[in-house]
């Protein structure tokens, strides 16, 4: 963390907190805003000479930033436009990536694109939207696996397993599973020029 002054090694608790933020559908921009606010407050506190040793120190400010964002969404304020714009941005990225598929597969990407644009008109609660996006992304991942083939998908998963091997004994199995799944999803979608469908990564 550049604000901290030197690298921060994430603990198991930190990984679980990051996972919770993502599952709550909090956009990455909002998480970073909360972290920034926490570090700003720390820089002006009596304990500023002590370095922040965990992301949990920032959890309260991330929650506060999330609450402000959700209130803005409910009130239709300027920041509340972010959610529909994020969905439209994902739809545009899918339009570009879908052109790489054969006609039958392309129609499946176009179906997701259409649903994203429809959802942008009535996005609803961010948590519900994030859960819905994860379902839509699962369909795209199945399509990408089908397109790249079993051998290529297996090779990609083997590469990710090798990358994660040094961390196997340093974090809980459920956290490692989440990171593995996220890495596979990101790499598979990137192979076909498709975006992640997540408010956490795209807002």
Image (cartoon, grey):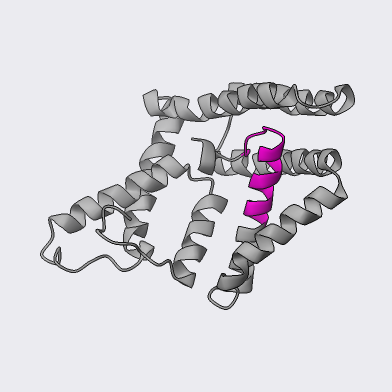
Task: Please state the horizontal and vertical placement of residue 43, each as a whole percent of the image.
Answer: 16, 56
Task: Please state the horizontal and vertical placement of residue 19, each as a whole percent of the image.
Answer: 54, 58
The residue sitting at the bottom extreme is: 169
Q: Is residue 121 left or right of residue 97?
A: left
- Kindly identify the residue that appears in the image at 34 percent across and 44 percent down: 33
- Kindly identify the residue that appears in the image at 69 percent across and 27 percent down: 97
Residue 144 lies in the magenta stretch: no
The reply to whether residue 122 is in sight is: no
Task: Please state the horizontal and vertical placement of residue 150, each as a whole percent of the image.
Answer: 86, 50
Quick one: 121 or 32, which is closer to the camera?
Answer: 32
Quick one: 30 or 15, which is closer to the camera?
Answer: 15
Instruction: Give the dominant element type of the magenta stretch: helix, strand or loop.
Output: helix
Quadrant of res 65? top left
The residue sitting at the right extreme is: 104
The residue sitting at the left extreme is: 46
- Kindly identify the residue that appears in the image at 28 percent across and 61 percent down: 6
Quadrant of res 44? bottom left
Q: How many marks?
A: 0
Q: Give the range drawn in magenta.
A: 181-197
Residue 191 lies in the magenta stretch: yes
Quadrant of res 174? bottom right
Q: In this view, does 24 lie to the left or right of 197?
A: left
* Whether residue 79 is situated above or below residue 61 in the rendered picture: above
Quick one: 99 or 66, which is closer to the camera?
Answer: 99
- Kindly identify the residue that appears in the image at 43 percent across and 38 percent down: 70
């Amino acid at each position: 963390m550049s604000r901290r002054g030197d690298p921060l090694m994430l603990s198991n608790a930190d990984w679980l907190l990051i996972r919770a933020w993502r599952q709550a559908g909090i956009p990455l921009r909002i998480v970073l805003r909360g972290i920034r606010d926490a570090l700003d407050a720390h820089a002006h506190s009596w304990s500023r000479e002590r370095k922040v040793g965990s992301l949990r120190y920032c959890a309260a400010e991330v929650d506060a930033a999330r609450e402000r964002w959700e209130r803005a969404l409910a009130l239709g304020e300027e920041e509340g436009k972010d959610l529909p714009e994020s969905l439209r941005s994902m739809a545009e990225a899918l339009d570009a990536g879908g052109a790489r598929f054969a006609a039958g597969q392309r129609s499946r990407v176009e179906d997701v694109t259409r649903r994203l644009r429809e959802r942008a008109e009535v996005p609803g609660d961010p948590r519900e939207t994030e859960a819905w996006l994860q379902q839509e992304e699962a369909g795209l991942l199945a399509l990408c696996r089908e397109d790249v083939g079993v051998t290529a998908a297996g090779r990609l998963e083997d590469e990710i397993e090798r990358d994660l091997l040094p961390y196997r004994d340093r974090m809980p199995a459920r956290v490692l599973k989440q990171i593995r799944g996220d890495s596979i999803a990101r790499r598979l979608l990137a192979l076909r020029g498709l975006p992640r469908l997540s408010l956490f990564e795209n807002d």
